[in-house]
């Protein structure tokens, strides 16, 4: 099934007008960026009023974001949407095939949280190392989605997950940094 594993990648690359090499083997999910261990309860301490909402540059805020991003997609979905985090999502960004967008929506929502809070909006850790970690977490949670669902004839869930991961690694810098010029390390127009 290796020929169907990356079937959508040429479609995605054609829509974005970029050439993408198909990886020879699936990416290995690396260990998460080291963070202080936090419980789910402490990640949302302010939801109960137990802790004040911190400024974006506050290390405690990043620690809360880290705790949220280290949850499984099911645990993440159960969290209250508390400020100051940006919880907005577009699900699985087009041109994701609609069947894939339905299957992977929980992982896409979590990935959007990572991009909007570490990268764009709050800029908790806007570097490339953190973007790669958020993308690896995306792959890990998509693989978890695949493991949690019954297999479906004709649907290569693991292959679809790998394709979506490859797409965000190839095309996600614009969403992370805001503009292509900032993604390349150059200053863009203000």
Image (cartoon, grey):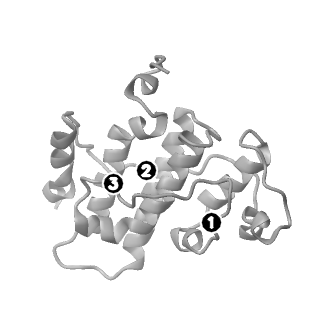
Residue found at x 54% / y 71% = 77
Question: Residue 174 at x, y = what percent?
Answer: 39, 35
Left or right of 117, for residue 132: left
Residue found at x 22% / y 39% = 16
Residue found at x 26% / y 44% = 24
Q: What is the CA distance from the residue labelled 3 to the residue labelled 1?
A: 21 Å
The residue under label 3 is 93
Secondary element at tag 2:
loop
Q: Are marks 1 and 2 in contact (CB under 8 Å)?
A: no
**Badge 3 or badge 1: first in the primary sequence:** 1
Q: Is residue 30 visible?
A: no
The residue under label 1 is 81
Q: Is residue 117 visible?
A: yes
Q: What is the CA distance from the residue labelled 2 to the residue labelled 3?
A: 23 Å
Question: Residue 47 at x, y = what percent?
Answer: 75, 68
| Residue sticking out furthest to the bottom | 150
Other residues around mark 2 within 10 Å, as few (<14) / some (14–19) / many (≥20): few
For the residue pair 158 and 47, the one nearer the viewer reads as: 47
- The quarter of the rendered structure image containing the N terminus is bottom left
For the residue pair 127 and 79, the one nearer the viewer reads as: 79
Q: Are marks 3 and 1 in contact (CB under 8 Å)?
A: no
**Badge 1 or badge 2: first in the primary sequence:** 2
Secondary element at tag 1:
loop
Other residues around mark 3 within 10 Å, as few (<14) / some (14–19) / many (≥20): some
Other residues around mark 1 within 10 Å, as few (<14) / some (14–19) / many (≥20): few
The residue under label 2 is 28
**Which quadrant holds residue 82?**
bottom right
């Amino acid at each position: 099934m290796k020929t169907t594993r990356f079937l959508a990648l040429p479609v995605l690359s054609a829509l974005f007008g970029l050439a993408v090499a198909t990886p020879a083997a699936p990416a290995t999910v690396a260990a998460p960026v080291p963070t202080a261990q936090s419980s789910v309860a402490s990640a949302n301490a302010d939801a109960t009023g137990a802790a004040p909402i911190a400024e974006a540059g506050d290390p405690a805020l990043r620690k809360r974001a880290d705790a949220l991003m280290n949850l499984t997609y099911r645990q993440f979905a159960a969290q209250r949407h508390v400020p100051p985090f940006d919880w907005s999502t577009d699900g699985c960004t087009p041109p994701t095939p609609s069947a894939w967008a339905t299957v992977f929506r929980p992982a896409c929502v979590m990935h959007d949280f990572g991009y909007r809070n570490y990268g764009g909006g709050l800029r908790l850790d806007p570097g490339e190392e953190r973007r790669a970690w958020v993308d690896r977490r995306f792959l890990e949670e998509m693989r978890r989605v695949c493991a949690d669902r019954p297999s479906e004839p004709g649907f290569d869930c693991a292959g679809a997950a790998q394709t979506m991961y490859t797409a965000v690694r190839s095309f996600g810098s614009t969403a992370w940094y805001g503009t292509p010029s900032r993604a390349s390390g150059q200053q863009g127009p203000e």
